[in-house]
Amino acid sequence: MEIKMETKMENDFNRNRILRLARYLRVLEKLKALGFGKVFSNNLGDAIGASPAVVRKDFSTISLPGSKRGGYNIDKLIEQLRAVLGKNESYDVIIAGCGRLGSALVEYRGFGRDGIHLIAGFDADPARMRADAPTPVYDIREMPDFIRSHKIAAGIIAVPEAAAARVLEMMVGAGIPGVLNFAPVELKGNGGCLIRNVNLALEIENLFYQIRLGCGQTDFDE
């Protein structure tokens, strides 16, 4: 039990660090666009709500050069953070479930900036299937073959709770390496597939809970 708890804490810590690295990158790209060439840990910390010590620790962990007094070269930081976060590569993604949430994700155009290409959707409802759409929507039964033939990097699940486990089984069986699950049910990883569960209702409940406690701290201060 202790080992499982330590592993979970370790995973949460690593996830928080990755989220911070992604935030640093966005801030740095904005600073570069404004003509800045150097940045300090306190600048980045203020921008994302973390302490300067956390910024320096994050960068030292992935061997990014810089110092407390001398600061960091923005161009070098951007280059190395993009490499660490895999931003120099492109990833083909599919989505299962093209109802309201799924359709909103399909229509979102921000993915392309990060090299993420949502190339197809799948659904069980014939009324939602549109092979001629900019992002085509196919019959869910075609999904496993599509995953295999297109070497899909990740899948998004946005189906009702009752169908989520079956959809995950189809994705894992087709060899997909990662899944982002928006269905209101906790899905467990298996077959070497990494699963990230995003329960929007729980996230909102957690937000209100922290508001009631008067908690202003974010998870970026770990």
Image (tube, rainbow, N blue to C red):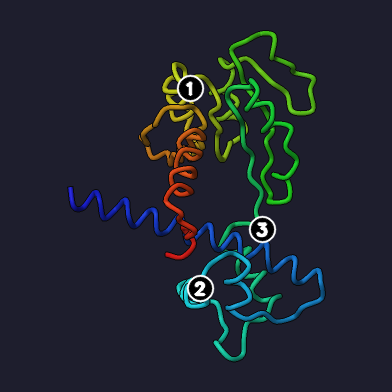
- Under circle 2, the secondary element is loop
* Marks 1, 2: nearer the viewer: 2
The reply to whether dot 1 and dot 2 touch (C-beta < 8 Å) is no
Disc number at residue 88? 3
At a point 66% along the width and 70% down the height, the residue shown is 79
Label annotation for residue 51: 2
Q: Rounded to the nearest whole Å, what is the CA distance between mark 1 and mark 2?
A: 41 Å
Mark drawn on residue 167: 1
Identify the residue at image location x=17%, y=47%: 1
Residue occupying the far bottom of the picture: 69
Q: Residue at x 60, y 71 (%)?
A: 46
Position of residue 56 relative to residue 161, above or below, is below
Residue neighbourhood size for the residue with mark 3, other residues' Cα within 10 Å, grouped as few (<14), some (14–19), many (≥20): few
Q: Nearer the viewer, residue 144 or 93?
A: 93
**Residue 118 percent location from the top left of the image:** 67, 36
Residue type, label 3: Asn
Type of residue at label 1?
Val
In the image, residue 76 sits, relative to residue 197, either above or below, namely below
Nearer the N terminus, badge 2 or badge 3? 2
Where in the figure is residue 91, as x and y percent of width and height?
Answer: 63, 44
